[in-house]
Image (cartoon, helix red, strand yellow):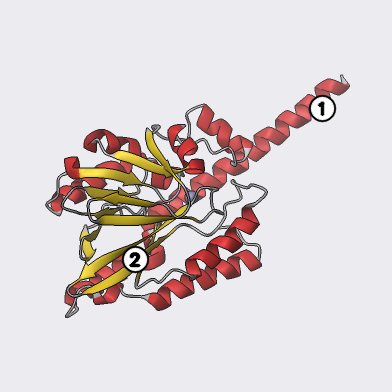
Amino acid sequence: MLLNVTKRRQLVLVLAVLGVVVLVLVARRLNATKIGGQGPAEPFRIAGNFYYVGATDAAAFLITGPEGHVVLDGGYPTTARLVMASIAKLGFDIKDVKVLLNSEPHADHGGGLAALQQASGAELWASEASADVLASGGDDPDGVLPLRALIWIGVLGYPPAHVDHRFKDGDTIRVGPTALTAHITGGHTRGCTSWSFPVRDGDRVLNVVSACDLGVLATSTYPEQAADRERSIRVLRGLPADIWVTCHARWWGRYRKFVASTTAKNPVEPFIDPEGYRAFLDAAEAELREGRTH
Ligand SMILES: [Zn+2]
């Protein structure tokens, strides 16, 4: 009898936690939709061989080169077709994409990678920790149990991607003359990866940083998380950034900068934003100090 009461309490607790997680996820999804997270967006050149090919908020980037292209992030599973349409609209062939990269393996950035991989035949590179999550279709061991349970039963999660190569912090991934350096900036997830690479605009070389998400979700925690976030902010502060982007396009002002670029004398100019980069890092640091999640 006592056991039954305990079991019933446990069941009620599990259901309550599950309910809260579902509510949080639905609210996030609705919020993302409201902001237009998954809506189609016009693809455009940011600078040189660096293009935006993502949705309204779930970002994806194309870095082109004579020996093959790189795509960074795949958005949600349903974003992949938008990414492919954007690549075609810019005049490039998905079959020329040779390398796929990822910022972090949550469904809004890793979800579309399997479809992109299938269409392109490209090889996927990921950090050790991200690789396991991408290959499992989104099951992050650092996720809270109710969230993982929803992935196990197929309510959440995404088509698993095949990870061809695992890189270490500081490794450079090359496709011909294109070279992107991986910075493992954990916190949001263990293997969260920021990328730095140069692009050419006329006779100048601009430093690009794609910063990984620096905030944390209540649904994903691990013991070294706070220390990782401290280190990640420090690492990112040390990277020179003329142009900066993140996996959520609203954070770096995709639309505002795109609109400004259509009338600018040099369309690259509105994307040059080292002050915005510093403000992004300051905000992330404040969020960390105040113990906020996002
Ligand atoms: Zn995430």
* Residue sitting nearer the eye, 176 or 123: 176
The residue depicted at 45 percent of the width and 48 percent of the height is 104
Residue 287 in the image, given as x and y percentages of width and height: 59, 66
Please, what is the three-letter code of the amino acid marked with disc 2?
A: Val
Few, some or many C-alpha atoms within 10 Å of disc 2 (few <14, some 14-19, many ≥20)?
many
Residue under label 2, please give it: 208
Image quarter hosting the C terminus = bottom right
Q: Is residue 152 left or right of residue 111?
A: right
Q: Earlier in the sequence, mark 2 or mark 1?
A: 1
Image quarter hosting the N terminus = top right
Please, what is the three-letter code of the amino acid marked with disc 1?
A: Thr
Quarter of the view holding residue 107: top left
The residue depicted at 44 percent of the width and 68 percent of the height is 239
Quarter of the view holding residue 284: bottom right
* Residue sitting nearer the eye, 274 or 36: 274
The residue depicted at 53 percent of the width and 49 percent of the height is 189
Quarter of the view holding residue 144: top right
Q: Is residue 36 left or right of residue 128?
A: left
On whether ligand 1 comes within 8 Å of the CB at mark 2, the answer is: no
Q: Nearer the viewer, mark 2 or mark 1?
A: 2
Residue under label 1, please give it: 6
